[in-house]
């Protein structure tokens, strides 16, 4: 039996009193759409006090108070990719053209 490394857990902690649940759910959907089964879990954690944090396993990868607001889809996907699989192309998100793209 072959053991595989555990897949990472993404935790999005958001302020429910600030009505950031939909923003958090959208970010979770974006990560699941992009990384799919390479992720072990994407969790939404409601809290209060204006908090908005994103953790990749135990590492903080976004803090609204420190990073100056909310990440856009590109920033978030790049930060997750850089930990999950740094060599992975995110295609147009990275500004790369797909292989075989003929055109300016």
Image: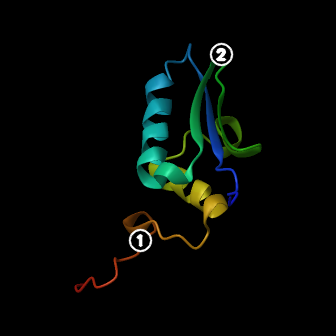
Q: Determine crowd level at label 2: few under 14, some 14-19, many 20+ residues with C-alpha closer than 10 A.
A: few
Contact? badges 2 and 1 (CB < 8 Å): no
| Inter-mark Cα distance, 2 to 1 | 36 Å
Q: Position of residue 59 (x, y in %)?
A: 76, 46
Q: Nearer the viewer, residue 46 or 9?
A: 9
Question: Is 79 drawn above or below residue 29 in the view shown?
Answer: below
Say which residue label 1 marks: 95
**Closer to the camera, 54 or 64?**
54
Q: Residue 80 falls in which quadrant of the image?
A: bottom right
Residue 3: image x %, image y %? 70, 57
The C terminus lies in which quarter of the figure?
A: bottom left
| Residue 35 horizontal/vertical position (percent) | 49, 54
* Image position of 104 with respect to 56: above or below: below
**Residue 68: where, in percent of width, then height?**
62, 42
Give the vertical position of 9 relative to 96 (above or below).
above
Secondary-structure class at tag 2: loop
Tell me which corner region of the image, top left, top right, bottom left or bottom right, holds residue 16. top right
In the picture shown, does residue 95 fall above or below 7?
below
Q: Farthest residue in the top direction? A: 17
Give the number of the disc on residue 86: none
Q: Which residue is mark 2?
A: 48
Horizontal side, residue 91 vs residue 7: left or right:
left
Viewport quadrant of the N terminus: bottom right
| Residue at x-position 41% and y-position 71% | 95
Left or right for 67, reference 27? right
Q: Which structural element holds mark 1?
A: loop
Q: Residue at horizontal 64%, vertical 22%?
A: 50
């Amino acid at each position: 039996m072959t053991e595989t490394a555990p897949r990472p857990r993404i935790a999005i902690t958001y302020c429910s009193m600030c009505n950031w649940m939909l923003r958090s759910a959208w970010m979770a959907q974006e990560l699941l759409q992009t990384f799919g089964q390479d992720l072990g879990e994407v969790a939404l954690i409601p809290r209060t006090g204006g908090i908005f944090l994103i953790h990749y396993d135990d590492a903080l990868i976004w803090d609204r108070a420190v990073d100056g607001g909310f990440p856009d889809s590109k920033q978030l996907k790049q930060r997750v990719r850089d930990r999950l699989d740094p060599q992975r192309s995110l295609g147009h998100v990275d500004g790369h053209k797909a292989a075989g793209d003929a055109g300016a």
